[in-house]
Image (spheres, rainbow, N blue to C red):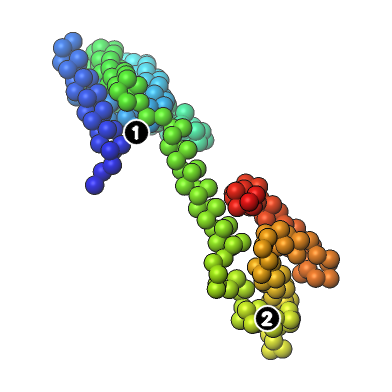
Amino acid sequence: MPTWREWLFSAKALIAALLALYIALAIPLENPYWAMASVYVVSHPLSGATRSKAIYRALGTLLGAAASVVLLPTFAQQPVMLSLAISLWIGALLFLSLLDRSPRSYIFLLAAYTVPLISLAEVNHPATIFDVALARSEEILLGIVCASVVNAVLFPSRIAPTLAAKMHLLLRDGRGAVSRMLNPAPGRSRPACAECAAGGCNGVGRDDQPSEPRQRQSSLHRSCSRISRADGDVDAPANLHRGLAAPASNRATAGHAEMKGKFTHFARNVLMPREFTK
């Protein structure tokens, strides 16, 4: 089932589309359905994104309409040259849209396909190209204005609450993960191997393993031993931090201990400060 936000977005888009269609029929415009279609093209659940997309669509439409007024009368008697000019226009603007990876690329996309939509429909009547381009621009701009006004007036949706909710879920999951890792439930064993769980881990791998895997296994075993010792204390996170700060002879590598220390510091001060300040 759709959420209430999706229902609200659908209702606002419908209201804006009907408003644009009513105004287009009342003026009247040549093709009122273009105003209604423009509403659904630019509508977005977030009000800011709707306004941004509306501005870029308006600029792209005006640029494409101006190019149509220039290209069609110039090459009206030369169909091959007209096709070549339109193809070069589309290719160049598509190339620019791919270079610009920001939302501004929507301007180039709109300007690219607006030219063939306006020019090719009037290729046999080049004298009316200005009126057609003007009417198409008015219809699209009407839909853009209606969509922007309705989204801004009727229950506007801001991006800040959406980001805040997602950050809350992310931090909640992070606190839960760190809490489970540093403060396991009674009876649960933290070590990653059976030897560490039994207290017999001496950091030495089996003889039938290659030297490099054995070194990695020894490093893991020593880390598990330090974490196991920290689990038995009342202040487990502090002892874990002290265990990671042990002399070099008790650590796998200095970089490994530094990484663990930074992670513990981050967990204590950022993710779950309440658990560590009790």
Numbered disc total: 2
- Within the image, what quadrant is residue 243 found in? bottom right
Can you give x and y, in whole percent of width and height, for residue 7 in the image?
25, 36
Can you give x and y, in whole percent of width and height, for residue 32 in the image?
19, 20
- Within the image, what quadrant is residue 247 found in? bottom right
Amino acid, disc 1: Pro
Q: Which mark is residue 152?
A: none
- In-front residue for pair 81/10: 10
Of the image marks 2 and 1, the number of the one nearer the N terminus: 1
Q: Residues within 10 Å of mark 1 (few under 14, many from 20)?
A: some
* Residue where numbered disc 1 is placed: 45
Query: Residue visible at 18% across and 10% down?
Result: 27
Which SS class for mark 2? loop
Q: Residue at the far bottom: name it.
A: 208
Q: Which mark is residue 199?
A: 2
Asked whether the viewer can see residue 85, the reply is no
Query: Residue visible at 43% across and 37% down?
Result: 162
Which SS class for mark 1? loop
Query: Residue visible at 74% across and 81% down?
Result: 202
Q: Is residue 110 left or right of residue 25?
A: right
Amino acid, disc 2: Gly
Circle nearer the viewer, 2 or 1: 2
